Amino acid sequence: MQPIATNSALRLLESSMGFNTLRASRPVLLAVWALLAGPCALQSSAFAAAPPGVPSQTAPDAQQTADVAKLTVLYVRQLRPKRLPPLSLLDIPPKDDGLSGARLAIDDNNTTGRFLKQNFSLELIESEDPAELIAETLKRVQGGLGFVVSDLDAKATLDLADALKGLDAVIFNISAPDENIREEDCRANLKHTAPSRTMLADGLTQYLAWKRWGNWVMIVGPAPEDKAYAAALRRSAQRFGMKILEEREFKYDPGSRRSDGGFEQIQQQIPAFTQKLPAHDVLIVADEGELFGDYFPYRTWDARPVAGTSGLFATSWHPAVELWGGTQFQNRFKKLAGRNMRPLDYQAWMAIRSIGEAATRKQSVERKPLIDYMVSPEFELAAFKGRALSYRSWNGQLRQPIVLATGKMHVTVSPQPGFLHQFTELDTLGVDKPETKCRSYTK
């Protein structure tokens, strides 16, 4: 028996384990294959335990090293120290937010890669200056790297895509939800594992429509990102037949929000602010910066549920997800990082796992074949969401279910029952092909 697990063998395992429709994590399958294949398969790994009496092999020999194809992923992170902290001390992001998800994906890729003689590694560059990050990324891409994971804001993401235009490289946007970089300002070398604001808004609105909570009032913050999310909610409301009865802008002074007596002021301020609203089913909050939205649950004048960026919220991932193998996924992450997985971690994990999945299927680490394969109809990514994920051919957005959750529990997953589509229900979330303004992907 050959020590390397072939795609045909993997497909047989997928079928026998019941994953023929939504495939399990390939690292898990390869572990099963290793057990089934016996010592022959295990001996192909440089990390296999040595038999009794034989010294353990701590490093591959020169010939094995020469035979391994190597692929390095570049992680580009923009440091943002000037951001105001969120309201709750529990929500302060860890220093390795996103990065630990990337590291887990590298480990998962290598679990597969060691059977296929592929090795994956991660390089990190970070700075407060986007121009410095772009210059260093360009230098490294020109030096041979072709896969870039980008944790930058929307403008810097576009600048990076323009700097790498014409080079054999692809950028994965893992953090910016802005619609313009997927639509009118889209770039052909840019993919998005972060869900867009319209995907998040559509996921939330579908559930409110399913609940028949069709009459909304909306509280919007003064920040540009708050207004952008509010615009996405207005679009979703119109798309799914909801009514926004009134909007109010909430102006806040964050300077003394944690001072003594602050909760007493809020306890009086929020009921007064929400008085005399029209009769409504749900109060929607648009506060992407998490600077005031959490004041609203349980403090409004009328006893109504709160949703949007607070209360019931839409997200790519939640640390309480247990379905579809989520428990073992969460446990593996917690063992690696010592904390719960956050959405940015998950979005980084999906980006790097996309590269690993393409490398496995194509049995190559060459840049162009992998980039082409990821936008082909054959590409699928198993990502612990109960469906195979793929990239939209018209704007590079990863289509994916949206989790709706509260602080401690996930509530449901969109698309909701009854929201149908001629190709895939996942395209009921976000901008569909007939609506797109992106022209960079047009062949």
Image (spheres, rainbow, N blue to C red):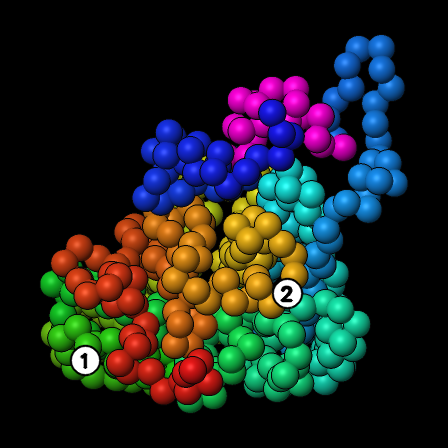
Along the viewing direction, whichever of 282 and 426 lies nearer the viewer: 426
Q: Earlier in the sequence, mark 1 or mark 2?
A: 1
Along the viewing direction, whichever of 117 and 298 lies nearer the viewer: 117
Three-letter amino acid code at the position of disc 2: Arg
Q: Is residue 309 left or right of residue 132?
A: left
Residue 405 locus on image (x, y percent): 35, 54
Which residue carries the number 1 mark?
A: 238
Q: Residues within 10 Å of mark 2 (few under 14, many from 20)?
A: some
Which residue carries the number 2 mark?
A: 367
Q: Is residue 143 left or right of residue 325?
A: right
Three-letter amino acid code at the position of disc 1: Gln
Discs 1/2, front:
2
Which residue is pictured at 63% across the width and 72% down the height? Answer: 169
Which segment is the magenta one?
A: 29-46
Magenta span main SS: helix
Question: Is-magenta flag for residue 226?
Answer: no
Q: Quadrant of residue 108?
A: top right
Q: Quadrant of the C terminus?
A: bottom left
In this rendering, does residue 338 appear at all? no
